[in-house]
Image (cartoon, rainbow, N blue to C red):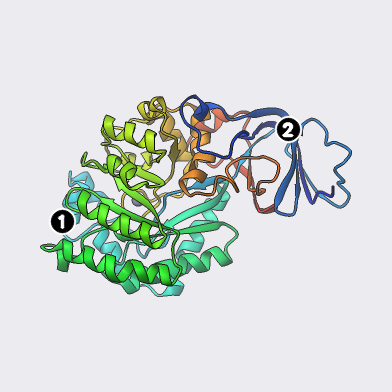
């Protein structure tokens, strides 16, 4: 069999081998390490994973050879929760935050998400495209190969929502990273519906959701279920309608107030529930039973100065598969650095390095429904791979704030090299 790319002399090859399924409980920390590893790739697929030398059946004539020089190789990292496409930035809120103003307080004064909405509405397609393209380049340099991106800065302006999703679609076509799109029209209550938010939900159900499906702009539908935003009942209505139309439900649940969003994610059969800082024990049990992936976003808690972390240990104990993501957005978490988030997860969520690796590979893939294609290094899967210039996995978490990535490979091609 002819190889087109070979990676040899791998110090530690993290395969995540096993079932192409989310990893829960003890399995969350089992990452299938191989010492002195070697990988052979043909076009965009992995054709061999092993130790030492390649078997004779693999023909390396003309193949590109990467000598990893004892470095660590993992599946390409997956950032499964971002607000990738948006206009503007909100560094002006830093001083307000230092004065003790909270997220909901800044929101109520017309700042926060509403200022991003205005900037996103004002920005042209090209401006949004170029800004997000730059972010994808940064992500690529950090070893990320797949990114989820949400709309949600239209806040009542459906045209802006469509513009965001069309930018994401174009980026998926043009940029080497894969961009998977989520419709999040229910991100905040538009000012004009402040006193009648049910009316806005009706518009969402009857006009926006059918149009998004008709235009084929998104795979997922997400809702910000939170006090002062969308209630449990409203979130349920939106997600069930989305599901009926063929979109896969996701939910921003129990981020600030413990509303019962985790319970709702299980009830509506969401693929994932995100944030979950205030998730109840019952909600966590419900998620485990329904197989909902928990997407935890410790960078957001860090940036908002929240002391209380999400209950990652309890989730793992109860058998909820845990994924991690940046939540990259201009307000609550303006960073593309998933490696830094991995350190925060270890320090604040008490997740072990091996559990963290699973959370940004296989479990992040599962949160996007692509665990059969990517998320592990196994024969037949897509050759999405990252090579890190580190002596072992723990080192990546321990030596924080910098970029350890050396090479990023997407679909069997080198798309970034330090
Ligand atoms: Zn978010």
Give the labeled residue for mark 2: 37
Residue 113 location in percent, x, y? 26, 58
Position of residue 152 relative to residue 310, above or below, is below
Give x and y (percent) for residue 315. Answer: 37, 30
Q: Residues within 10 Å of mark 2 (few under 14, many from 20)?
A: many
- Between 32 and 392, which is closer to the camera in this rendering? 32
Does 282 appear above or below 5? above
| Element type where label 1 sits in the image | helix
Q: Is residue 89 above or below residue 26?
A: below
Question: Going from the N terminus, do you reach mark 1 or mark 2 first?
Answer: 2
| Ligand 1 contact, mark 2 (Cβ < 8 Å) | no
Q: Which mark is residue 179?
A: none
Residue at screen point 26% across, 33% down: 280
In the rendered structure, the answer to whether residue 409 lies left or right of residue 84 reads: right
Q: Is residue 151 left or right of residue 26?
A: left
Read off the residue under disc 1: 108
Any part of residue 231 in sight: no
User: 143 or 16, which lies in front?
Assistant: 16
- On the image, the x and y values in percent for residue 220 come to 41, 57
Label 1, label 2: how far apart the Cα atoms are = 54 Å
Q: Position of residue 209 (x, y in %)?
A: 34, 66
Image position of 245 with respect to 106: above or below: below
Residue at left offset 37%, top offset 46%: 269
Quick check: is the Cβ at mark 1 less than 8 Å away from ligand 1?
Answer: no
Q: Who's the residue at 30% across and 67% down the image?
A: 154
384 sits left or right of 263 in the view: right
Closer to the observer: label 1 or label 2?
A: 2
Residue at the (26%, 52%) spot, across then down: 236
Q: What residue occupies the far front of the structure in this picture?
A: 244
Query: Would residue 28 be found to the left or right of residue 6 on screen?
Result: left
């Amino acid at each position: 069999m002819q190889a087109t790319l070979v990676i040899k002399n791998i110090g530690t090859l993290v395969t995540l081998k096993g079932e192409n399924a989310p990893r829960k409980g003890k399995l969350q920390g089992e990452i299938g390490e191989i010492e002195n590893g070697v990988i052979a790739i043909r076009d965009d697929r992995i054709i061999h994973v092993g130790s030492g030398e390649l078997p004779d059946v693999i023909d390396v004539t003309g193949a590109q050879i990467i000598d990893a020089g004892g470095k660590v190789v993992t599946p390409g990292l997956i950032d499964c929760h971002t607000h990738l496409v948006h206009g503007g930035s909100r560094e002006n809120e830093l001083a307000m935050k230092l004065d003790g103003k909270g997220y909901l307080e800044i929101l109520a004064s017309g700042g926060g998400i509403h200022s991003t909405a205005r900037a996103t509405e004002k920005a042209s397609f090209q401006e949004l495209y170029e800004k997000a393209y730059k972010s994808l380049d940064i992500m690529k340099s950090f070893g990320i190969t797949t990114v989820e991106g949400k709309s949600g800065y239209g806040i009542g302006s459906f045209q802006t929502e469509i513009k965001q999703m069309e930018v994401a679609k174009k980026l998926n076509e043009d940029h080497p990273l894969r961009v998977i799109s989520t419709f999040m029209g229910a991100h905040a209550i538009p000012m004009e519906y402040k006193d009648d938010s049910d009316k806005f939900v009706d518009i969402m159900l009857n006009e926006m959701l059918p149009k998004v499906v008709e235009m084929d702009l998104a795979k997922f539908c997400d809702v910000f279920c939170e006090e002062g935003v969308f209630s449990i009942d409203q979130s349920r209505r939106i997600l069930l309608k989305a599901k009926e139309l063929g979109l896969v439900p996701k939910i921003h649940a129990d981020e600030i107030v413990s509303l019962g969003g985790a319970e709702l994610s299980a009830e509506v059969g969401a693929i994932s529930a995100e944030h979950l800082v205030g998730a109840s024990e019952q909600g966590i049990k419900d998620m485990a039973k329904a197989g909902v992936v928990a997407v935890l976003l410790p960078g957001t808690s860090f940036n908002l100065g929240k002391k209380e972390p999400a209950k990652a240990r309890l989730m793992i104990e109860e058998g909820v598969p845990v994924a991690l993501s940046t939540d990259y957005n201009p307000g609550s978490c303006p960073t593309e650095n998933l490696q830094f988030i991995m350190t925060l997860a270890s320090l604040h969520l008490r997740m072990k390095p091996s559990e963290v690796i699973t959370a940004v590979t296989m479990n992040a893939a599962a949160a996007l429904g692509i665990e059969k294609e990517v998320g592990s290094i196994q024969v037949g899967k897509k050759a999405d791979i990252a090579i890190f210039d580190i002596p072992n996995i723990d080192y990546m978490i321990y030596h924080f704030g910098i970029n350890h990535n050396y090479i990023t490979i997407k679909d069997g091609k080198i798309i970034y090299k330090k």
